[in-house]
Amino acid sequence: MNIMSINAGSSSLKFSLFNMDTKDVLLSGLFERIGIEGSNYTIKYNDCKIKEEALMETHSDAIKILMDKIIELGVVKSLEEINGIGHRIVHGGSIYKESVVVTDKVLDDIIALSDLAPLHNPAHAICIKAFRDVLPNTPMVVVFDTAFHQTIEKDRYLYAVPYNWYTDYQVRKYGAHGTSHRYVAEKLKEELGRDDLNIICCHLGNGGSITAIKAGKCVDTSMGFTPHAGIIMGTRSGDIDVSMVPYVMEKAGKSAGEIMNDLNKKSGFLGISGISSDSRDIEDGIKEGNERCILTQKMYVNSIVKYIAEYYLLLGHVDVIAFTAGIGENSMDTRSDVIEKLSPLGIFINPEANNVRGKFAKISDKNSKVDVYIVPTNEELMIAQDTLKLIDRM
Ligand code: AMP
């Protein structure tokens, strides 16, 4: 069985075609700058890489190119050999608690939920429609990034704001990165052979979130109504006091949109360090003694430790703290800085074991009361696995 996993952003489209019998990736890549001058794509297959420019006004254009290339490169002989397509959907609101097969109603819901994810849900809908045009008989599944967090109880997903903000405008915590957190939880369950694990999962990438997971179910997550909330990120501020918004609007003569742009695109690592949103540049700056980079890392670690401490109490007993995504998988310094601050809880790192990048590994000391693991995430495979499971039942 071959399953295509599709992850569409507002102007990008990532794809992976899996042979689900072997879990091999037959082809993968990325379309970038869709609808923007200089649109281009990269395709990787059989250890080869193609990078080309092509005019793409919409995601449909990208999908047409992708289908042509798959045949031209001989990855499959006919498009009929693609047995299913799984789409990552950023927002499923309170409606979708798990992945589902695409129907007209599901497509309508995704479009209707665009208010909550204005950059992403419309792009997802375009992709679903485009695949219906080119592969009308191929089943499709949607995997919602918010679904994993739908098990959070009301006393943890509501905000203490006028109640009608929730009932009239759906203002509540939804969270994000759910597909990644679920992958990590399932991988740990499989590797450790236990389905009762209490996990604190730290997804530390350009975006970042921390999730408390009890026996495979999410009980809380650090992102909120939008991905803006929670820990400090590459360019997002994470949690702030909202009163600074009207204050700076007035002081700087900025509109609400401009302030949101500052908070989303100019804050976080970039805002504090003044040099970069990339953690590698921050680490280089720290080595050179750059005070603002040192401050960035301290604030970043503080924001992570704050959530781990809260979730430690929430879970009562923690079996595993997991690190995943670009920084979590690769930055030894961030992992050790975080774990060092957890020593009052009897949690300790093994510096030698921590000297590893991008591999599943236990990195805690043998005296640590909680095991600490690196678990490389694989959202694409998670999407393909859900797709296979649901189309098998059709
Ligand atoms: P992601 O959003 O998961 O792709 O993660 C992006 C972040 O991971 C960026 O801040 C990168 O600097 C960081 N990252 C990727 N590779 C490394 C590495 N080798 N060392 C430290 N950070 C890394």
Image: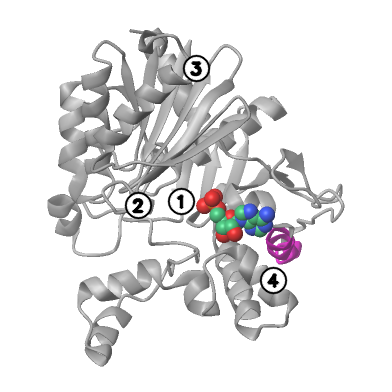
Crowd class of label 3 (few under 14; some 14 to 19; many from 20; radius 10 Å): some
Crowd class of label 1 (few under 14; some 14 to 19; many from 20; radius 10 Å): many
Q: Mark 4 or mark 3: which comes first in sequence?
A: 3
* Residue type of the residue flagged with mark 3: Val
Q: CA distance from mark 1 to mark 2?
A: 37 Å
Circle number at residue 75: 3
Report the magenta residues as a range. Answer: 333-344
Q: Mark 1 or mark 2: which comes first in sequence?
A: 2
Q: Residue at x 39, y 73 (%)?
A: 240
* Residue type of the residue flagged with mark 4: Asp
Residue identifier under label 2: 38
| Ligand 1 within 8 Å of the CB at mark 1 | no
Residue identifier under label 4: 284
Q: Write down the quadrant of residue 238 in the picture.
A: bottom left
Q: Work out whether 371 lies above or below 96.
A: below
| Ligand 1 within 8 Å of the CB at mark 3 | no
Q: Mark 3 or mark 2: which comes first in sequence?
A: 2
> Would residue 327 be visible to someone looking at this image?
no
Please name the predominant secondary structure of the magenta segment in the image: helix
Is residue 175 toward the left or the right of residue 188 in the image?
Answer: left
Q: Work out whether 234 lies above or below 385.
A: below
3 or 1: mark nearer the eye: 3
* Residue type of the residue flagged with mark 1: Thr
Indicate the position of residue 384 as horizontal and vertical percent values: 46, 24
Indicate the position of residue 361 as horizontal and vertical percent values: 75, 40
Circle number at residue 221: 1
